[in-house]
Image (tube, rainbow, N blue to C red):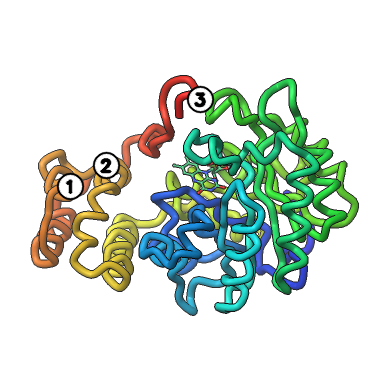
């Protein structure tokens, strides 16, 4: 077990735990963040990546992504762009509107982001990336963090040098996904690469990220890389109780307890309720994406899972839940990571 101060400072912010929810575009929306926080143990959550220009033009899509609530704290908003001036203006807009943390995306491998010079592409130009970070940091009073990968590919591992330079520019923390852009989501997370990034900085926290699915994975990430905190993305989808387990383990309690089926059904219902607060009836459509996931988690018979994928009204949702309460199964083994869609095929075509 790792024995250290449970809270952590990121710039001027004291975060209540060292285990953070990593952004998963399309999944870690407000309802999901609030739900995970209600379970407990989350130190920080970050919005899905938001295109700076979309935010600046006030488009509804961006407004939905940055929507938050008093319970959704501490929160950082993640922005991306290949243009420094847009990132600066978006950061200023966010700080002016009361957001307390800004995260710059330098890890996204998607072509539509990289082709505009954003996401992981920024890691290829050390001077440009430093200039960008420096200008964003100087423009706002709130802590600015950067989330990146190890580098573009095996031959360009730029994370340690960039982390050191970003620290000098005033970045408050770095999150590092231990894969290169060209690896996409394949291959093993390189703890050694993360460790080299941790060693490259002097004072700021480095947050290790990648493939943490269990309490033991999280502690191993901390031990083998020396990172100060851990960001968990898909692991939080596969097991939303992971942060509670971590909190329990740190308190010396048994982390391996399982929530009862009633608690899990309550979780499903709460997820939908919170979605409805934000999206009203459109939640019936948005929730469909989670049908397969809840289907596996709750061992829901196929016909019910299918209805969860098609329902059109609140009344129908209530009826399905009633059926689930009566006809759930027991969880069948592990939920496959495959239920969380990552792009297929060669990374160059993503
Ligand atoms: C579906 C999906 C969406 C993602 N969206 C984002 C995002 O918006 N911003 C970001 O920085 N990383 C994003 N990531 C990367 C994750 O935050 C994380 O770095 C990566 O999945 C590895 O960590 P994990 O194994 O804990 O999920 C996404 C990953 C997935 C699978």
Mark closer to the observer (3, 2):
3
Q: Secondary structure at mark 3?
A: helix
Q: Whole-Å distance between the Cαs marked 3 and 2?
A: 26 Å
Question: Horizontally, is 286 left or right of 258 in the view?
Answer: left
Label annotation for residue 116 = none
Front residue of this view, candidates 285 and 249: 285
Left or right: residue 132 compared with residue 105: right
Mark 2 and 1 residues: CB-CB less than 8 Å, in contact? yes
The yes-or-no answer for disc 2 within 8 Å of ligand 1 is no
**Could you say where residue 246 lies in the image, as x and y percent from the top left?**
60, 55
Q: Nearer the viewer, residue 174 or 94?
A: 94
Where does label 2 land, which residue? Answer: 292
Task: Please state, as top left, top right, bottom left or bottom right, where the C terminus lies in the image.
Answer: top left
* Residue under the point 62% across and 50% down: 83
The answer to whether residue 35 is visible is: no
Q: In this picture, is 287 found above or below 186?
A: below
Residue 218 % position (x, y) = 64, 45
Marks 2 and 1, Cα distance to the nearest angstrom? 8 Å
- Is 40 on the left-hand or right-hand side of 247? left
Q: Callout 2: 10 Å neighbours few (<14), some, many (20+)?
A: some
Point out residue 28 in the picture as x, y percentages from the top left corner: 44, 55
> What mark, if any, has residue 347 been given in the picture?
3
Label number found at residue 309: 1
**Residue 150 screen position, x and y as percent:** 70, 34
Q: Determine the secondary structure under disc 1.
A: loop
Distance in Å between CA atoms under marks 1 and 3: 30 Å
* Precedes in sequence: disc 1 or disc 3: 1
> If you read the primary sequence from the N terminus, does the residue marked by circle 3 or circle 2 appear first?
2
Image position of 37 (left or right of 44): left
- Residue nearest the viewer, comparing 284 with 306: 284
């Amino acid at each position: 077990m790792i024995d250290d101060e449970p809270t952590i400072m990121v710039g001027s912010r004291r975060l209540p735990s060292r285990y953070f929810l990593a952004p998963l575009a399309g999944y870690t929306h407000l309802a999901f963040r609030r739900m995970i926080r209600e379970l407990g143990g989350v130190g920080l959550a970050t919005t899905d990546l938001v295109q700076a220009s979309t935010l600046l033009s006030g488009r509804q899509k961006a407004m939905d992504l940055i929507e938050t609530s008093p319970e959704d704290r501490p929160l950082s908003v993640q922005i991306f762009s290949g243009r420094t001036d847009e990132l600066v203006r978006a950061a200023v807009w966010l700080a002016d509107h009361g957001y307390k943390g800004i995260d710059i995306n330098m890890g996204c491998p998607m072509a539509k982001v990289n082709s505009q010079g954003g996401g992981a592409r920024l890691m290829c130009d050390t001077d440009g990336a430093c200039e960008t970070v420096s200008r964003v940091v100087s423009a706002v009073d709130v802590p600015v963090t950067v989330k990146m990968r190890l580098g573009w590919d095996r031959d360009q591992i730029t994370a340690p040098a960039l982390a050191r330079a970003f620290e000098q520019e005033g970045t408050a923390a770095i999150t590092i996904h231990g894969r290169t852009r060209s690896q996409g989501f394949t291959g093993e997370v390189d703890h050694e690469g993360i460790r080299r990034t941790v060693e490259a900085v002097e004072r700021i926290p480095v947050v290790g990220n990648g493939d943490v699915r269990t309490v033991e994975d999280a502690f191993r990430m901390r031990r083998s890389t020396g990172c100060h905190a851990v960001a968990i993305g898909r692991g939080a989808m596969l097991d939303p109780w992971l942060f509670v387990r971590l909190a329990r383990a740190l308190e010396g309690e048994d982390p391996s307890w399982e929530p009862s089926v009633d608690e899990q059904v309550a979780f499903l219902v709460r997820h939908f309720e919170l979605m409805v607060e934000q999206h009203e009836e459109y939640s019936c459509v948005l929730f469909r994406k989670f049908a397969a996931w809840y289907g596996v988690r709750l061992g829901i018979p196929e016909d019910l899972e299918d209805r969860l994928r098609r329902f059109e009204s609140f009344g129908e949702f209530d009826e399905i839940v009633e059926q689930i309460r009566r006809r759930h199964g027991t969880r069948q083994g592990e939920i496959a990571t495959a239920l969380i869609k990552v792009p297929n095929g060669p990374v160059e075509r993503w």
